[in-house]
Amino acid sequence: MFTLDGAQNLIPFLKEICSSISPLRNKVKDLNVEIKTLQIRMQGNGGAASHNHLDKLNSDLKSTVTKINEKISDIEAKGIIIKSIDPGLFDFEYVKDGREVYLCWKEGEDNIAYWHEKDTGFAGREKL
């Protein structure tokens, strides 16, 4: 369980993580497009050079995903619940009026200004 202040104090950490994940997300998207394009080209004319390039792209993709997963682990280690990384959407367990709810923060917001019931998700966000 978090206090509001405790969760707010983690927002700079989340902003930094989101900032570092953003280019990695873009790289994964770009690599996936490049891999698919190369695979289609290889169906027609193959070749060792293309296979070597495909291996390099797959290696880059694996490395980038590993970096993202490390950052996800850093977030989870703090007890923060990750709802999405694209865009970043995070929940913090919180007690409001005697019931367990989530404080909610979305990438791009200045601070935590919303909460929601555990079963409503982002669509059920309400102002604090």
Image (cartoon, helix red, strand yellow):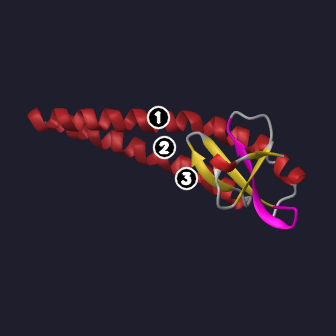
Q: Residue 27 has which mark?
A: 1
Foreground: 19 or 61? 19
Residue named by callout 2: 64
**Residue 60 appears in the rendering:** yes
Q: CA distance from mark 3 to mark 2?
A: 9 Å
In the displayed structure image, the side of residue 65 where residue 80 appears, left or right: right
Toward which corner of the image does residue 38 lie, by quadrant? top left
Residue at x 84%, y 46% (from the top left corner): 128
Q: Tell me which numbered mark, 3 or 1, is placed earlier along the sequence.
A: 1
In the image, residue 97 lies in the stretch drawn in magenta: yes
Q: Are marks 1 and 2 in contact (CB under 8 Å)?
A: yes
Asked if marks 3 and 1 touch (Cβ < 8 Å), the reply is no
Q: Of 59 and 20, which appears nearest the observer?
A: 20
On the image, the x and y values in percent for residue 101 come to 76, 60
Characterize the magenta stretch by its predominant secondary structure.
strand
- Compared to residue 85, the image places residue 74 above or below, namely below
Given the image, on which type of amino acid does mark 1 rest? Lys
